[in-house]
Amino acid sequence: MLVTALFSAFLLAAGGTEKPHVSDLTVSLEAGHIDVGFTLTNIFDDELVERIQTGLPTGFDFKLRLVRSQRWWWFDPNLGSADLNVVAMYNAVTGEYLVNYKQDGKLVDSRVVREIPELRDAMTRFESLRVFDTEGLETKKRLWVRVQAELGSRHLLFLIPTTIETGWAESRRFRLPEMPE
């Protein structure tokens, strides 16, 4: 009975606002690469800004997967995967935010911003990320890209650790262009 009441209270508290999700997922095919763009929406609020302004590193992890059409007997449709980590840190002396981007554990970019709208865009809006190589992939198979964001963790009933994540967003289906020999 207590568990049901707690679960109902959790659902009522979470139902008032729209949940964070990945939107505007775009894919562009460049010579030998697949570039991805997307936006993480409904995440940037006053609570997140306060958490960043404490000076502790705060950020999100994004999982990106290149997927092909699968048959029911095929176990792993993933052709490639990448992880993008975005972390912001506030410097109270200068009043600046440092945003670091790591792709598969390697630092790929850093940006310094001063205003909250710039910080929001730097942490949630991504364009033309070079994520996957097309070398060795079949050109006749239909492919698409999936993206999911990990937003943090919490404990259910003070005992069970869980990860807070968005659902998977999927791009439109596409085929790789045939390369001339």
Image: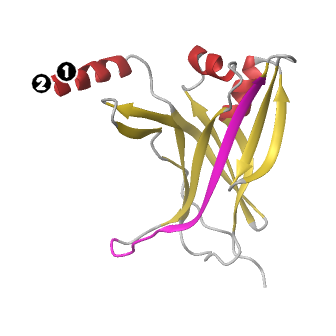
For residue 131, above or below residue 126: below
Picture quadrant where residue 65 is located: bottom right
Q: Which residue type carries mark 1? A: Ala
User: Magenta residues?
Assistant: 72-90
Do the residues bearing badges 2 and 1 touch, measured as CB atoms within 8 Å?
yes
Look at 83% across and 20% down and name the residue there: 114
Mark 1 Cα shell of 10 Å, populated few (<14), some (14-19), many (≥20):
few
Query: Does the segment drawn in magenta span residue 94?
Result: no
Q: Residue furthest bottom?
A: 181
According to the image, label 2 marks what residue? 1
Image coordinates of residue 21 in percent, x first then y, are 51, 35
Res 99 label: none
Work out whether residue 56 or residue 38 is closer to the camera in this orientation and state it: 56
- Quarter of the image containing the C terminus? bottom right
Image coordinates of residue 5 in percent, x first then y, are 19, 21
Q: Residue furthest left?
A: 1
Res 5 label: 1
Q: Which residue type carries mark 2? A: Met
Look at 24% across and 22% down and name the residue there: 6
Disc 2 element: loop
Work out whether residue 131 or residue 157 is closer to the camera in this orientation and state it: 157
For residue 50, above or below residue 161: above
Q: Residue furthest right?
A: 94
Image coordinates of residue 17 in percent, x first then y, are 43, 19
Mark 2 Cα shell of 10 Å, populated few (<14), some (14-19), many (≥20):
few
Look at 59% across and 34% down and name the residue there: 40
